[in-house]
Amino acid sequence: MTLHQVYRWLLAGYPRAYRRQYEDELIGVLLDDAAPGQRRPAARDVLALLGGALRAHVRQVGARFSVDAWRDAAQVLGLVAALVLFVRAARVPVLHLSMFAQSYPDGIGEDFVSWPRCLVAVLWLVVAVSAGAGWGRVAAAIAVGGAAFEVVRVAEAYGQYSTVRNLWPAVLAAMVPLALALRAPRSLTATLARWRLGTLAAATLVSVGAPSVAMVTAADDSTAPIYGTWMFTVGVGRVEAILLTTGYLLFALAVLSTPTALRLRLLALVVPVGVTLLLSRVGLGTTGTFLERSSHDGVVDALTWAQWSTVALAPVVLFAVAVVILHHRERPGAHEA
């Protein structure tokens, strides 16, 4: 392999548009600087080219994510994620309050109210309201506390039971401050329209109130609970399952009814959460899964380094793939025959 070919091979790591504009010029400069008879590039040139390729890709990614469509999508994601996390944190405290109002002394123990759960529910509600009011930076700062709480809760659960079933809320919570920290070109009202904001509010109320409605109406048969991963809870009655499913469908309606450019970016942004959910709920099981975990005396073993690597890298890699597919789809001429 000649020195010219080696330099061209090293430059293959640069973005295509960059190579089209500068490849021949760079190779010419590098060959002019080479010593007579030199067959291999100097180590400093190799490092400079690899570092330049990395910086070029980072700049390209930054330029792609700085466009208005991505900023709008990040803003919407921050709002929807905060509402989902509020629903998850508030359902049990709201149920306990309903039990207290209905005078259910047998159903209320000393731990009638889990104050950390109540506080984090209020925190996520404040984040959602702040984001909806256009105070994105304030909402992002507050969301850091909620994200820290979710991460600590996952760490405690893993330390005690080696479980990662609830890893997805920590991933979602970590994305909220990052998403809301970006300054969007339009307000949420302009991006989503009032009816979608109303739909999100209705979805939140239905989902939070589902167990309380089922309890107050005494419509559920507690002896025949329904289990479903899509409900994100261990077991619920039929009425609560219907209400929860209705709430989830309303969330989906608000997101999937957005314009195509916004909708595709929202779906790409939730890929890491979806992958984490599948890995933690399905992939890292104890029987018949592709990342099967062994157990001894009913206690699940800790994750191996390979399993941790998969949990950490798979969401990032698949998110990158989703972004590449999205930009390829939207590239001018991509749909031409």
Image (tube, rainbow, N blue to C red):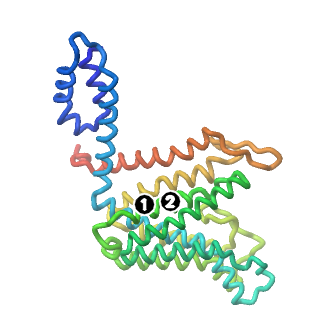
Question: Can you say which quadrant of the picture contains the N terminus?
Answer: top left
Residue 308 vertical placement versus 207 (above, below): above
The spot of residue 73 in percent (x, y) is 36, 63
Q: Total label count?
A: 2
Place residue 149 in its image quadrant. Answer: bottom right
**Tags 2 and 1 touching, CB below 8 Å:** yes
Left of 47 or right of it: where is 146? Answer: right
Q: Secondary structure at mark 1?
A: helix
Q: Nearer the viewer, residue 171 or 40?
A: 40
From mark 2 to mark 1, how far is it between C-alphas? Answer: 7 Å
Q: How many residues crowd mark 2 within 10 Å: few (<14), some (14–19), many (20+)?
A: some
Question: Can you say which quadrant of the picture contains the C terminus?
Answer: top left
Place residue 169 in its image quadrant. Answer: bottom right
The spot of residue 146 in percent (x, y) is 54, 67
Give the residue type that dot 1 points to. Leu
Camera sees residue 172: yes
Place residue 228 in its image quadrant. Answer: bottom right
The spot of residue 91 in percent (x, y) is 62, 75
Q: How many residues crowd mark 1 within 10 Å: few (<14), some (14–19), many (20+)?
A: some
Query: Going 31% across and 41% down the picture, which residue do you hit?
Result: 55
Give the residue type that dot 2 points to. Ala
Q: Which residue is mark 2?
A: 174
Left of 25 or right of it: where is 119? Answer: right
The spot of residue 246 in percent (x, y) is 54, 73
Left of 15 or right of it: where is 158? Answer: right
Q: Which residue is mark 1?
A: 178
Q: Nearer the viewer, residue 22 or 245?
A: 22
Q: Give the farthest residue toward the top.
A: 37
Q: Secondary structure at mark 2?
A: helix
